[in-house]
Image (cartoon, rainbow, N blue to C red):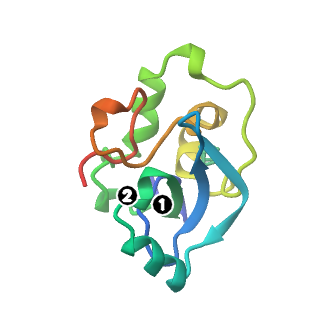
Amino acid sequence: MENQGKTCPSAKFTKGALLIGIRNEADEIDLLKDPIKITEDVYQKFTQAKTKPEKTLRLANKCIESGCNQWTGKKCGVIDNLLNTVEEKYVKDQLPECGIRSTCRWYSQTGAEACKVCTLVTTFKEDPKEDKFFSGRDTW
Ligand code: SF4
């Protein structure tokens, strides 16, 4: 599959990444209608904190395909794993508002089904076993 400018919706916290969501008290992600670019100032503040930003923030950035350990050779494995494992009761009926849908890697692979489980994904957890769903990245 060609990259064609696809966007990873569960990216690392880096300068220039887009903030697309924030974890709420229910341990799900509230997606932002309008993504916010991570500026130098914001980056510095978060990197001084003791906690990894990816525990509470969802970020988007360019999909790097084979440069990522979640790339299966032809596509991103994260969304397929999630769709295969998430229990039906957690799947949303509605698509959340989202500012990156037009280029989202997961949406391009599985369409609306991806969006119905997207808000369950936390990019990083200290212990992936804590995560009843699938953390976007468990090998940092
Ligand atoms: S999977 Fe859907 S809701 Fe999630 S980031 Fe992609 S387009 Fe947005």
Whether 2 is drawn above or below 42: the answer is above
> For residue 65, which numbered disc appears in the image?
2
Q: From where the camera sits, is residue 8 visible?
A: no
Which residue occupies 67% across, 26% down? 92
For disc 1, the marked residue is 3
Secondary structure found at label 1: loop
What is the quadrant of residue 125 in the picture? Answer: top left
Which residue occupies 59% across, 14% down? 89
Answer whether labels 1 and 2 touch (C-beta < 8 Å): yes
Left or right of residue 100: residue 106: left
Left or right of residue 84: residue 21: right
Give the residue type at disc 2: Glu
Locate residue 31, reporting x and y percent.
Answer: 66, 49
Which residue occupies 55% across, 65% down? 5
Locate residue 134, reporting x and y percent.
Answer: 40, 34
Judge: label 2 CB < 8 Å from ligand 1. no
Which residue occupies 71% across, 57% down? 99
Give the residue type at disc 1: Asn
> For this rendering, which residue is in front, 122 or 130?
130
Q: From where the camera sits, is residue 9 visible?
A: yes
